[in-house]
């Protein structure tokens, strides 16, 4: 146990070393279990580069916009190719070669909700939670393609137990228990501005999940990757827990990824303005990479083509298809070094006198890695445009931009469009805004074709203005 004192001192953590040396055996044991998971050899360099200094993101001189497949198709040839890709995606789903993966390990601080973000009620009529909404979409996709779609859910130490309890208490929302595979990501210790690791309590460091970039290694370490391989899964449909609009498995996206022989694929959204808070898809030296909105020089962000559209148009909604064998290769030796990103945070801690401190101002750095930093590691990346209203309603805040409120409105609008596609008029005001509340269960309908078939079998009268309506199982 006392070997940790040397390890800590060698890593420049003298304050913690002294605390540890004088701690009671049961405290030592708990801390040592956390130390086991920290790479103390790399820690001093990390603290030097990311905490004591602020790393600048280098913008490559040859930075260019990344090419993407437009959506919808622009010409007949493309239409034909997309039809072929859609069919390929359907075949992949029918053969059980795809799995869904939700990253749900985040802290959800902006939403300010007590509990895993996936347990947040989101639907406008029945108040179904994010997890239930996805679960029902997965049930429907499984039914549609005649093969159970397995759902991998990444949690973190802060919400793993609560997430598992939530699923058990809700009978996995009708999914078979073995259709849901939970796995837990790694953590990183918070580092105070003076370079010292912070303690959250007497026997625990202040830890936080290591970012969604932690997914790749966590897939390997948890055995999820092996489970996928044994089940014949080749493609992973990756999405974030706070975006209920995302298709859990989109045949076109999966099929195009396969036909293009990509290792990782991305949906892109045309940015609405140069400064929209989406990462920018770029190319440099033949490799695709994302430059965060905050790192993009204004001059590049604002640059326009002759037709007036933004040159760097493609923004990332964090929706991907990842080939399982790409993850296998990246993590083959049980290690994967993605760059770290610094976030300045208010981290509560216990000081040297045992007093709990709740800082009013940021006092520490949290380090996270991001999944999109795997893009430059891929030889082949495929990017497909997406229709924002159909696939992206991030629930970051309670109200305002990117909020539960805006997401609910988007869910209503999308269901309204699906009803109209099925020939059922929906009341709208002069500006075209839907004038009733609607919810269609994803257990019955996951796309427009489903909506048409569903309402053919279950004819429904046109909803009246001001009414509240629920359709489906
Ligand atoms: P965000 O970056 O929006 O973070 O995560 P968050 O934790 O949900 O919310 P804030 O920033 O604290 O308000 C985007 C997605 O990545 C997952 C989240 O659960 C969410 O689905 N994520 C994020 C992880 O799975 N692990 C992480 O370490 C970070």
Image (tube, helix red, strand yellow):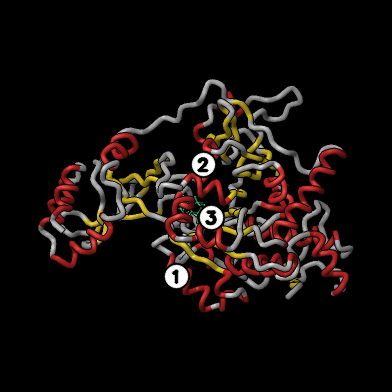
The residue tagged 3 is 397
- Cα distance, mark 1 to mark 2? 29 Å
Dot 2: few (<14), some (14–19), or many (≥20) neighbours within 10 Å? Answer: many
Q: Which mark is residue 286?
A: none
The kind of secondary structure element at disc 1 is helix
Mark 3 vs mark 1: in front:
1
| Residue 438, visible in the rendered structure | no
Q: Which callout, 3 or 1, points at the residue further toward the start of the chain?
A: 1
The residue tagged 1 is 162
Q: Nearer the viewer, residue 277 or 12?
A: 12
Choose top left, top right, bottom left or bottom right for residue 50: top left
The residue tagged 2 is 374
- Cα distance, mark 2 to mark 3? 27 Å
Query: Contact, CB < 8 Å: mark 3 with mark 1?
Result: no
Question: In the image, residue 333 lies at what x, y percent?
Answer: 41, 47
Q: Tell whether circle 3 marks a residue whose Cβ is less than 8 angstroms from ligand 1.
A: yes
Dot 3: few (<14), some (14–19), or many (≥20) neighbours within 10 Å? Answer: some
């Amino acid at each position: 146990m006392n070997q940790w004192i040397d390890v800590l001192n060698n890593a420049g953590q003298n304050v913690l070393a002294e605390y540890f040396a004088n701690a009671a055996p049961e405290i030592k044991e708990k801390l040592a279990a956390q130390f086991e998971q920290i790479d103390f050899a790399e820690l001093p360099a990390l603290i030097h580069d990311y905490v004591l200094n602020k790393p600048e993101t280098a913008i490559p001189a040859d930075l260019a916009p990344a090419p993407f497949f437009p959506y919808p198709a622009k010409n007949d040839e493309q239409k034909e190719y997309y039809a072929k890709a859609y069919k390929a995606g359907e075949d992949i789903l029918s053969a059980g070669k795809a799995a869904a993966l939700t990253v749900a390990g985040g802290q959800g601080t902006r939403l300010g909700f007590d509990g895993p973000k996936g347990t947040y009620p989101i639907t406008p009529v029945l108040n179904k939670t994010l997890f239930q909404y996805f679960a029902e979409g997965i049930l429907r996709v499984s039914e549609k393609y005649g093969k159970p779609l397995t759902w991998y859910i990444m949690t973190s130490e802060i919400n793993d137990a609560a997430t598992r309890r939530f699923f058990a208490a809700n009978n996995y929302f009708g999914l078979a228990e073995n259709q849901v595979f939970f796995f837990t990501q790694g953590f990183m210790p918070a580092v105070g501005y003076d370079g010292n690791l912070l303690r959250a309590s007497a026997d625990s460091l202040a830890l936080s999940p290591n970012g969604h970039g932690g997914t790749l290694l966590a897939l390997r370490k948890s055995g999820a990757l092996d489970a996928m391989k044994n089940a014949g899964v080749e493609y992973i449909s990756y999405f974030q827990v706070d975006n209920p609009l995302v298709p859990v498995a989109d045949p076109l996206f999966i099929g195009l990824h396969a036909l293009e022989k990509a290792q990782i694929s991305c949906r892109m959204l045309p940015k609405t303005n140069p400064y929209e808070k989406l990462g920018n898809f770029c190319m440099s030296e033949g490799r695709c990479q994302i430059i965060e909105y905050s790192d993009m020089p204004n001059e590049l962000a604002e640059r326009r083509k002759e037709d007036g559209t933004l040159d760097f148009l493609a923004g990332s909604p964090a929706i991907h298809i990842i080939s399982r064998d790409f993850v296998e290769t990246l993590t083959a030796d049980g290690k994967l070094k993605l760059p770290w990103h610094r976030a300045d945070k208010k981290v509560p801690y216990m000081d040297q006198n045992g007093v709990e401190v709740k800082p009013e101002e940021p006092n520490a750095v949290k380090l996270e890695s991001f999944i999109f930093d795997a893009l430059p590691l891929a030889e082949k990346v495929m990017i497909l445009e997406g229709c924002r209203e159909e696939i992206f309603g991030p629930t970051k805040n309670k109200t305002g931009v990117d909020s539960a409120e805006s997401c609910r409105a988007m869910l209503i609008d999308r269901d309204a469009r699906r009803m109209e596609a099925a020939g059922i008029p929906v009341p709208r005001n002069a500006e075209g805004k839907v004038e009733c509340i609607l919810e269609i269960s994803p257990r019955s309908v996951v796309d427009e074709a489903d909506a048409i078939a569903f309402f053919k079998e279950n004819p429904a009268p046109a909803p009246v203005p001001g009414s509240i309506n629920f359709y489906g199982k």
